[in-house]
Each structure stands twice: as C-alpha cells, then as structure tokens.
Amino acid sequence: MLPKPRRDVWTSARGLLVCLACLLTGTSTAQTPPLRLQLSLGEAVTRALRANPQVLIANLSVTEQEQAAAVARSALLPQATLEVPERAQRINIRTGFGRSFPGLPQHAGPFQVFQAGTLFSVPLLDLSLWHRWQQARHLTDQSRADQQTVREQITLLVVSQYLSGLRATADVRAAESRVELARALYQQAQDLARQGVATGLDALRAEVELRNEEQRLIQARTALQTTLYGLARLLNVDPTTEIELTDEVSFYATPAFEAEATIAQAWAHRPELKAIQAELRSLEAERAAVRAERLPALRAAGNWSEQGLSVNSVIPTYTYEVRLELPLVTGGRIQAEIAREQARLERLLQQQQDLRNQIAMEVRVALANLESARHEVEVARLGVTLAEKEVELARDRFQAGVANNIEVVQAQDALARAQDNQIGALFRYNQARAELARATGQMEALYAR
C-alpha cells in the first residue's frame, strides 16, 4: 500500500502552480495606460474635418454625384457592344411572305446560326442629352457646396466645444485658486481665534466658505470632463483617449476678427447660398432639357458582324443607319414637365431671397454680439482686479482685528462672481468671433490652420 502524500507537499505544489499562472497571465491582465492626445484648436478642427462621420458622408455624396455626372456624360459618347450569339432557328415561310408557294414546305429549318460582331450607336445631335449633362454638373456643384456647409457646421461645433473646454479649464483654475485662498483664510481665522483676536464663529464661517469652494471645484472638474468627452465624440477618437487642450493661454486673449465681415462677403462665401445657386442652374438646365425634347434628335446606329450557319461558313454582314426622331404627340407630358420645373424654379428663387435676408441678419447680429462681448471683457477684467483688491483689504482688516471675517467672506464671494463674469465674457467673445466667421462663411479658413 502506497503511503499518502504529505499535506505540506500538496500545499507547496499548489502554490507553485498559482505562481506560474500569475506569471503567464500577468501580461494579459495588466492594464495599458490610456492614450493622451494633445490638441490645439487648429489641430482639433483639422482632425474633425478628416475623421468626423458627417464630413465623411458629405465626401461620399460628392463622389456619388460626380459619378452621376459621368453617367450623364456617357450618354453623349459613342456606345459599342460585342455580341457573339449562336442560336437555332426555324421560320414559317408562309408568314414571312404572306402566302404559301406550291412545292415549298411551310417552314424552313431548324438550322443553326452563328454570329459574332458589334452593335454601336452615337447621338449626332440631341440637345436634351446635352442639357441633362449640364444639369448633372450643376448638381455636382451643389453637392460640393453642401459638403462645404457640413464642413463649416462641424468646424463651428468643434470650435464651440473646444472653447467650452477652455472655459471649463479656466473655471477649474479659478476654483483651485479660490480653494487655496479659502484654505489660507481658514487657517488665518483659526490662528486669530487661538490668539483671542477672532471668535470661533469667524473660524466656522471661514470653514463653511472653504467647503463651498471645494464643492465648486468638484463641479468645475466634472464639467471639464464631460466637455472633453463631447469633443472626443466630434473628433471621432477612441472613447478611452484622454484629450488635453494646449490653447489654454489663448482663451484669455481677445484677437480681432481677421477676415472680411460684411454682408457682401457673406453672400459671396456662404456655401448654403452657393448650393441654392447651383440648384437653380440645375433646374434651368432641366427645363432646357425638357424643352429640347420637342426638337429633332439625330442618331447613328448599326452593327457589323460575321454571320453564317457555322463558324467555317461565316461572311461579313452589316447594317448602318442614321435616324431622325421628332416627337409629334406626347400627351401633354412635356408641357406639364416644363410647368413643374418653372414652379420649382420660382420656389427656389424665394428660398434664395429668404436665405440672403437670413445671412444679412446673422452677420449684423454676430457683429453686435462681438462688439458687446469685447466691452464685457474689458469691464470683467477690471472687476476681477477690484475684487482681488477687496479681498486683500478685507483680509488685512481682519488680521488687524478691526473687523470680523464677514467682510472677508463677502469679498470672496465678490471675487468668485468677478472671475465667473470674466470667464463668461471671454467665452462669449470667442464664441461671437466664431459665430461671425460662420455667418460670413469663413469658418474653416479662420480656424483650420
């Protein structure tokens, strides 16, 4: 009878197996650090215009319409087809000649026929096809204008989201500085209370203010994270990627609008207006194509082939023809189509005028908002300077025992409001600048660089 293995041997073996399993699976269970992506505003816009799904869909729409124009152009070019049939035939002689012949059978065949050759056709004169090709080209221009509209909209969304991220970052920085100030004032209140200069109520007020500032800091950090998540969605990047904004300093700058900001420039650059103009030209071409259907069309067609009862007995055969086609009665179809295109044309003209008025209003509103935001930034900066001096004076009065820390708490609240006002004014200025670029159709030109 074999002796039973000792318990400590089994324990050691099990421990060895556990260690080996940890070594084998350690590399697979190790967490990879998240990818960090540092982006300036221009880099964010460029990346979005390259990877955003809406932009990619617009690019595919342009490609689709370009191929549709190529199809319309092909109708104006010669067409040729290679044909190699081999068939068995049996024909009715009586139906072929309209009568029967004595001594001849009623039918001929069956017999095999081999044929190899080409069929061809070419429109020599067809204005309807030419106008439809022009229509397809104008539709391609419209598709390109729609593509540019999407690019402008995505650029505006990215710029707005990036500016929101900069605003959230500024909120975090301001909240952190206020927490440090509140912590220092709380420590000051405790020291003065121990010295008998201040009361316990002063220290309690300072601690309440500290906790309030800490709560605002938590809210600011959460707002920053959610804003960066939205930016990552617009850029179509991996959701686990951590985005870092590198243009934080520029948020406090107020650069002037560098492009033309006139209504005439907006009418010249807005892609929506270009899209309507291209659609108008396509409708005019469509109407001309319908009218051209009343005119004669001249076509050449034919075939050339080797034909015989077998491959060894083939001889050349051909048919060439020039055909003139002139519609006589269409049941009112052409007139109805012309009236339909005219109605669509008048509707588009009304939409064009409405869009021009809308663009003019957007430019005026954007200019007014930009000017107002510029003055807001100047006033807000002065307010922050004054609030910081107020905190300093209130702190000195509290330190000297001249007043309790109610003045300090009030000064802290005033500083928080002044910083919020400054950050809000800076955000509104940069947003108004972006809105003006969008209103004048120069969004991508201003930010994608």
Image (cartoon, grey):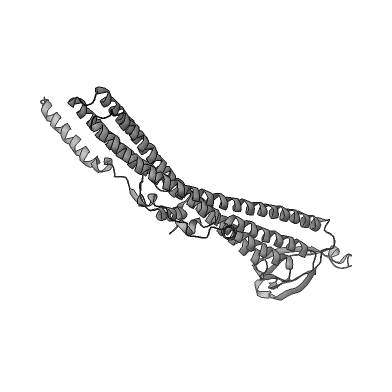
Where 230 sits versus 265, above or below? Answer: above
- The answer to which image quadrant residue 240 occupies is top left
Q: In which quarter of the image is the C terminus?
A: bottom left
In the displayed image of the protein, which residue is found farthest to the bottom? 316
Where 367 sits versus 16, above or below? Answer: below
> In this view of the protein, can residue 309 be seen by the observer?
no
- In front of the other: 355 or 272: 355
Horizontal and vertical percent for residue 186?
Answer: 25, 31
- In front of the other: 176 or 343: 176
Report the side of 438 relative to 309 (left or right): left
Q: Quadrant of the N terminus?
A: top left
Report the side of 16 relative to 139 (left or right): left
Horizontal and vertical percent for residue 391?
Answer: 31, 37
- In front of the other: 232 or 406: 406
Number of numbered discs on residues: 0
Report the side of 235 relative to 278 (left or right): left
> In this view of the protein, can residue 287 be seen by the observer?
yes
Horizontal and vertical percent for residue 242?
Answer: 35, 45
In the displayed image of the protein, which residue is found farthest to the top? 200
Report the side of 62 relative to 203 (left or right): right
Residue at 70% of width from left, 59% of height from top?
283
Horizontal and vertical percent for residue 428?
Answer: 46, 46
